[in-house]
Amino acid sequence: MKRIIEIYDLGLVPYRKMWDLQKSAQQKLIDQKKKIRDGENIEQISNDVLFFVEHPHVYTLGKSGDSTHLLKGISELTDIDAEYIEIDRGGDITYHGPGQIVGYPILDLDRYFTDIHKYLRLLEEVVIKTCSEYGIEAGRKEGLTGVWVGEEKICAMGIRCSRWVTMHGFAFNINTDLSYFNHIVPCGIENKSVTSLSKIIGQFIEPSNVKSKLADHFAEIFDAEMISANTAEPKLQNSYL
């Protein structure tokens, strides 16, 4: 049976709201797995999901992170219209904001493979191949997660997996205001900087084109059919979840 991944492009969504939506989508797939295992009749099988969003300015700290990597006092974040949230993914501190494409794949890895390291490497490959379409040679760094262009990180990654169903994902800098990274030690890595597609190319990059390329490479690498879902948020919440 062909694997199907539904794409929801939700635009600008506050981080906490999107976090709740991810958890609901993940739990839906977990509950479905249990019903199938228990032999219950399911009228319609739910597909995997890929959410594309942007977030208002926010710093998120993973469960293995170090809060001292936030270099600005929490009370000072209002000065730059940002917030700070401790979350349940792996990894250290990172920044999300306008101009950054954040991808949240909610995948039942039992449909693909049960290997978290392989999953991360394939997510990296999706971004690497997308960069190559813009003439950018991106790659990996040994011992580090994410996608790099030279010594600069262009895409951060952090995931959480429960019963082999994923959540969280990748943050790909497109037209991002990189000055916001000056207030943290990105991903807890000293002496490394960040970059973006627009900084490297020297012009504004149309986000919809990037998302289209990401979806194409996601389909290729995960051997799945990508279908665009209705992105109206009330419909998403009422019928999908």
Image (cartoon, rainbow, N blue to C red):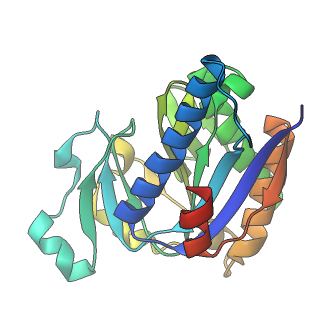
Q: Position of residue 236 (x, y in %)?
A: 60, 66
Q: Position of residue 120 (x, y in %)?
A: 60, 33
Compared across the picture, whether 89 is left or right of 77 comes to right
Q: Position of residue 34 (x, y in %)?
A: 56, 24
Quadrant that contains the N terminus? top right
Q: Is residue 190 visible?
A: no
Count of marks placed on residues: 0
- Name the residue nearer the viewer: 45 or 87: 45
Compared across the picture, whether 209 is left or right of 39 comes to right
Q: Residue placed farthest to the front in the image?
A: 41
Q: Residue at 53% across / 33% down in the picture?
A: 31
Q: Is residue 31 visible?
A: yes
Q: Residue placed farthest to the right in the image?
A: 1
Q: Position of residue 212 (x, y in %)?
A: 79, 64
Residue 163 higher or lower than 237, as above or below = above
Compared across the picture, whether 9 is left or right of 162 comes to right
Q: Quadrant of residue 175?
A: bottom right
Q: Residue at 28% across / 57% down in the picture?
A: 184
Q: Residue at 65% across / 68% down in the picture?
A: 9
- Name the residue nearer the viewer: 11 or 209: 11
Q: Residue at 78% across / 55% down in the picture?
A: 215
Q: Quadrant of residue 181?
A: bottom left
Quadrant that contains the C terminus? bottom right
- Name the residue nearer the viewer: 240 or 150: 240
Compared across the picture, whether 231 is left or right of 64 comes to right
